[in-house]
Image (cartoon, coloured by chain):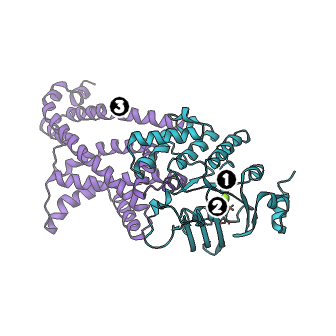
Chain colours: A purple, B cyan
Amino acid sequence: MEQIIQQFFNVEIMIKALPLVIKGLGITLLICAVVIPMGAIGGLFAAIGSLSPNRAVRWLSIGFVDLFRAIPPLVLLIFIYAGLPFAGLSLSPFVAVTIGFFLNNSAYFAEIFRAGLLSVPRGQTEAARSTGLSQAQTLTYVTLPQATRNVLPDLLSNVVEVVKLTSLASVVSLGEMLHAAGLVRSLTYNASPLILAAGIYLLLLWPLVRVIARFERRIAS
Amino acid sequence: MTTPAPGTATLEVRALHKSFGALKVLEGIDLSVQRSEMVFVLGPSGSGKSTMLRCCNRLEEPDSGDILIEGDPLTGPGVDLNKMRQRVGMVFQSFNLYPHLSAMGNVTLALRRVQKKSKAEAEDLAIAALAEVGLSDRAGHHPAQLSGGQQQRVAIARALALKPTVMLFDEPTSALDPELVGDVLDVMRTVKDHGMTMLVVSHEMKFARDAADRVIFMADGAIVEQGPPEQIFGAPTHDRTRAFLSRFHG
Ligand SMILES: Nc1ncnc2c1ncn2[C@@H]1O[C@H](COP(=O)(O)OP(=O)(O)O)[C@@H](O)[C@H]1O
Ligand SMILES: [Mg+2]
C-alpha cells in the first residue's frame, strides 16, 4: 500500500511536475482550440457534400470520410510527421498534429452532421424552398439548426474524444500534457505525474460528460 | 410585378406531363385559374393531384409542359425560380412548420431572408398575416405548443405573408382531428373572401360545394371533368366521377 502511494500518488513529485504538466495542458488546449472548430467546419462541409445531388461531390466527400475514419489516427500522425518528409514536406510537430487530427476529426464530425441532416424531414426543405429560400438559406436557417440540435450529444461526445486524442501528439514529441507528464515520470522513475495528468483530464472532461448525459436524457424523454 | 394583360389567367398549366420512372403520373394537364377564383381538385388517391400541385411551384420538376403565373413562365431557361416561388404560396398536408422557430419566426423567415425586409417591417407583416388566420396572440408560441389546427393556420399565414399571386393547398385538413377542421376551413374562406386565387386539393365536399367556384375531377393523371360545384356534385357526366362521389354520399 505504502508503495502504491509512493509510486502513483506522490504529492511531492506531483508538485514538482506541475509546472511542466500545466505547460503541456496549455498545448493540449491549443491543439483542441484549433482542431475542434476546424474539424467541425470541415466535417460540416463533408456532410453537406456527401448529400449533394452532384455525384462527383458526393463520392469525393464520402471517400474522404471513409478514408479518414478507417485510418487509425496514430498511423495518420506518424505518416504525416515521419513519412511526408520523404516526399520533401517537413512539418513542425504542431502543424503535423493539427493536420492529422483535423483530417481524422472532420471525418467523425461529418458522420454526425450527416446523420443530423438526414434526421430532418424532407417537408422542412420543401416548405422553405416553396417560400423562395435558396438551397444555402434553407440549410442555414431551416435544416442545419434542426440537424445540430438533433445530434448535439454526439457532437459533444466527439469533442470529448478529440481532447483525449490529443494525447497521441506525444508520439511526435509535441509537449502536450501527457507527453510532459511522461517526461517527468521517466526522469523521476515515478508514475505520479501520469496520475496528475489523468486528474486534469478528468477535471476538464467531467463537466462536459455530465452535460452530454443531461442532453441525452432530455432527448430520450 | 407588372399588371398582367386583361384575360391572362392567374395560374395557367399547359400540357403538363410528369412521370416517375416508368410510372406516368400526369398525362397532359391543361388548367387555368382566374384571378380570385377558388378551384377545388378532387380525385382518387394516386391520381396525381399532389404531383400536379407540386409541379406548380416546381417542388416536382415537370417533364414537359408550361406553367405560367400571370403570364410569366415558371419553367424554361432564365427563370428566377426563388423569385417566382414567392408568387406561389404552398400549404402542405403535414403543415411543415419549422419546429425550432416561433410562429413569428416561421412567418418572418422568408420575409426577411428572401424579400429582404427589415426586422420591424417583417414583424408587422407577420402580425397582420397571423391576425388574418386568427392567431395574433400566438406569435411567440412554437409549433409544439400549438394544436394541429393552429399549426396549419400558422402555415397558411406563412404563405400568405409573402403576398403570393396564387396559393396551393394540398389536403390542408387531412391530418387534422375532425373538430379542428372547421377552423382551418374558416380561415381558407376568409383568405378567399379577401380575393386570393386558390387551387385546393381536398376531400372536404361540403366546403367545396359552399365555397368553390369550380370543381375539377382528376383520375389517372388527367382531368376527367370540371364545372361549377352544383354541376359536378349534382349532375356529374362521367361514370368515374359518379363512382368517386358516391363513396362520399352517406
Ligand atoms: N417522388 C415520387 N417518386 C415516385 N413515385 C411517386 C412520387 N410521388 C408520387 N409518386 C406516385 O405518383 C402517383 C401519384 O401520386 P400523387 O400525386 O401523390 O397522387 P394523389 O395526390 O392524387 O394521391 C402515385 O402512384 C404515387 O405513388
Ligand atoms: Mg396527395
Number of on-image labels: 3
Rendered view: B215 above or below A182 = below
CA gap, disc 3 and disc 1: 48 Å
Confirm whether circles 3 and 2 share one chain.
no
For label 1, the residue is B171
Of tags 3 and 2, the one toward the viewer is 2
CA gap, disc 3 and disc 2: 50 Å
Q: Which mark is residue B50?
A: 2
**Mark 2 falls within which chain?**
B
Q: Quadrant of residue A82?
A: bottom left
For badge 1, the amino acid type reads Glu
Rendered view: A130 above or below B176 = below
Tag 3 and tag 2, C-beta contact below 8 Å? no
Tag 2 and tag 1, C-beta contact below 8 Å? yes
Front-most of A122 and B33? Answer: B33
CA gap, disc 2 and disc 1: 9 Å
For badge 3, the amino acid type reads Pro
Q: Position of residue B233 (x, y in %)?
A: 82, 58
For badge 2, the amino acid type reads Ser
Whether ligand 1 has any atom under 8 Å from the Cβ at mark 2 is answered as: yes
Whether ligand 2 has any atom under 8 Å from the Cβ at mark 1 is answered as: yes
Q: Quadrant of ligand 1?
A: bottom right
Q: Which mark is residue A207?
A: 3
Q: Position of residue A140 (x, y in %)?
A: 40, 50
